[in-house]
């Protein structure tokens, strides 16, 4: 099937099932193009919760579709590629976290949204990279177990000296590849560009950046900035939105290795097949869902 026919078929199936397509900012261009909405994992989950569509095709990785299901249990949430996981989310499991809680009985658990529903269910509050500081601040506890991203944990810990952090050893395999040397080289080749990076990058990269933020914050920053050139330190999929929204500006990827293979698994064909066969339907144990929802609701409550 050629691309045009595939898109026509997708649109027909969307109508038939009263379905909507949502795509993460790291998805391939073709998928972002056909999506009804693009965004970060939390914005997309919130959209799923408030929309009237019965079926959501969630183009992203497993924990994202799971987060949507936690907030929208009555909707059918489809993940087109069932093997699209997030290696960082898999770096912490319920057993390991329970052990850490036993070893640190006075600590609260803050989990990054890049985590499984089981881990969210064991956490006091969930956070994204844009509200992690406020999430930690909202807790009265002095000790914080932060899972799973050590880089995001260290980034916020620097800004919260009054708290004692126990960092998990997780990291994003894609963002962790970048080092200070890469930033220095990129700056040398584009001396008048400013550097925008994601807090999943190593501390040595974050230290050299002009701005640190989530995908949503990076896009907002670039859109509002009077600067014309930017070096981007996050997954390459973000370039689609940045270029689309800023035709007069130049964007350079910090490193060509900023590619998340899991985010690249979803194609037009997988979206088509997801709608044709109604797969893969995300289901959650109700007890886990409700506990995980408490952690997400607490995050929502802090705004
Ligand atoms: O929460 C998300 O969507 C992730 C993983 C990254 C970001 O900054 O948007
Ligand atoms: Fe996970 Fe990193 Fe891929 Fe995001 S970019 S889904 S954190 S591996």
Image: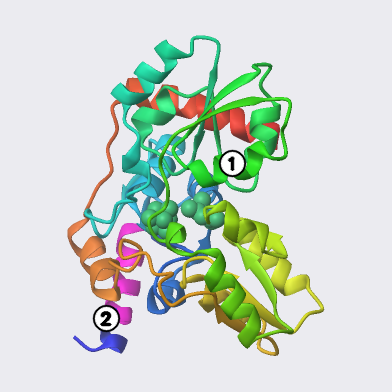
Give 133 or 285, whichever is nearer the viewer: 133
Judging by the rendered image, the residue that carries numbered circle 2 is: 6
Q: Nearer the viewer, mark 1 or mark 2?
A: 1
Please give the range of residues in magenta. Answer: 7-18
Density class for disc 2 (Cα within 10 Å; few <14, some 14-19, many ≥20) is some
Quick one: label 1 or label 2, which is nearer the N terminus?
A: 2
Residue 11 within the segment the image draws in magenta = yes
The structure residue drawn at horizontal position 61% and vertical position 74%, both measured from the top left corner, is 184
Give the alpha-carbon distance from disc 1 to disc 2, as whole Å. Answer: 45 Å
Residue 47 sits above or below residue 228 on the image: above
Residue 213 sits above or below residue 127 on the image: below
The answer to whether the residues at label 1 and label 2 have Cβ atoms under 8 Å apart is: no
The structure residue drawn at horizontal position 59% and vertical position 79%, both measured from the top left corner, is 186
Residue 251 within the segment the image draws in magenta = no
- Residue 147 in sight in this render: yes
The structure residue drawn at horizontal position 53% and vertical position 51%, both measured from the top left corner, is 47
Q: Quadrant of the C terminus?
A: top right
Across and down, in percent, residue 174 comes to: 40, 61
Quadrant of the rendered structure where residue 163 is? top right
Quadrant of the rendered structure where residue 114 is? top left
- Disc 2, SS: helix
């Amino acid at each position: 099937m050629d691309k045009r026919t595939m898109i026509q078929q997708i649109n027909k199936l969307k109508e038939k099932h009263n379905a909507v397509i949502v795509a993460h900012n790291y998805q391939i261009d073709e998928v972002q193009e056909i999506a009804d909405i693009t965004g970060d994992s939390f914005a997309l989950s919130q959209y799923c919760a408030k929309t009237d569509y019965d079926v959501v095709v969630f183009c992203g990785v497993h924990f994202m579709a799971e987060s949507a299901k936690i907030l929208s249990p009555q909707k059918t949430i489809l993940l087109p590629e069932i093997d699209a996981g997030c290696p960082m989310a898999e770096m912490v499991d319920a057993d390991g976290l329970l052990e850490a809680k036993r070893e640190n009985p006075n600590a609260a658990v803050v989990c990054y949204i890049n985590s499984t529903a089981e881990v969210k269910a064991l956490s006091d509050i969930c956070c994204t990279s844009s509200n992690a500081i406020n999430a930690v601040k909202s807790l009265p506890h002095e000790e914080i177990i932060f899972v799973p991203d050590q880089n995001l944990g260290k980034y916020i810990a620097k800004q919260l000296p009054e708290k004692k952090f126990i960092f998990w050893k997780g990291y994003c395999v894609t963002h962790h590849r970048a080092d200070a040397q890469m930033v220095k080289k990129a700056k040398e080749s584009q001396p008048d560009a400013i550097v925008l990076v994601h807090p999943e990058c190593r501390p040595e990269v974050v230290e050299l950046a002009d701005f640190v933020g989530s995908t949503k914050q990076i896009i907002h920053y670039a859109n509002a900035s009077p600067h014309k050139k930017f070096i981007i330190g996050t997954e390459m999929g973000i370039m689609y939105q940045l270029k689309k929204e800023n035709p007069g500006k130049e964007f350079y990827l910090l490193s060509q290795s900023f590619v998340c293979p899991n985010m690249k698994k979803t194609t037009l064909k997988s979206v088509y097949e997801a709608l044709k066969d109604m797969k893969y339907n995300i289901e959650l144990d109700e007890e886990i869902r409700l506990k995980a929802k408490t952690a997400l609701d607490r995050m929502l409550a802090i705004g």
